[in-house]
Amino acid sequence: MTAPNAAAHNSARHGSGELNWLLDELVQRVASIRKALVLSSDGLATGASADLTREDSEHLAAVASGFHS
C-alpha cells in the first residue's frame, strides 16, 4: 500500500496525517467499520478517518479517555 497525498489530508483534518490515510484504507476495506480513530495515551486524537470531523474526533477521544481512566 502506498499513502495517498497525506499532506492534503493533514491540512483539513487533525493529527499528524501519518495515520489518516491508513485509517481511511481500513474503513474502505472492512465493511463493518464506518469510522476510525486513534488516540494517544493521554486521550488526544492522533489520527482519524475522513468521515470524522475534528470536533467529533476530539469529543470521542475525550469520552474514550474517560472510560479508560
Image (tube, rainbow, N blue to C red):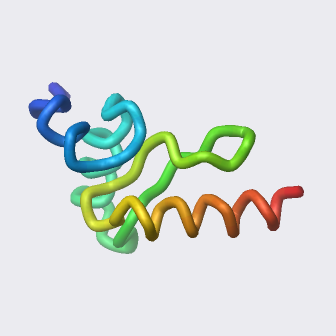
Image quarter of residue 9: top left
Q: Is residue 24 above or below residue 15?
A: below
Locate residue 8, reporting x and y percent: 12, 37
Residue at 16% x, 26% y: name it.
Answer: 2
Q: Residue at x 30, y 59 (%)?
A: 27
Q: Quadrant of residue 63?
A: bottom right
User: Quadrant of residue 5 in the image?
Assistant: top left
In the foreground, 36 or 47: 47
Q: How many marks?
A: 0
* Percent position of residue 31, x then y: 30, 70
Q: Quadrant of the N terminus?
A: top left
Which residue appears at 39% of the width and 52% of the height? 48
Above or below: residue 1 compared with residue 54: above
- Quarter of the image for the C terminus: give it: bottom right
Q: Position of residue 20 (x, y in %)?
A: 32, 42
Residue at x-position 67% and y-position 62%: 62
Residue 30 is left or right of residue 68, and the answer is left
Residue reaching furthest to the right: 69
Residue 32: x percent and y percent? 38, 73
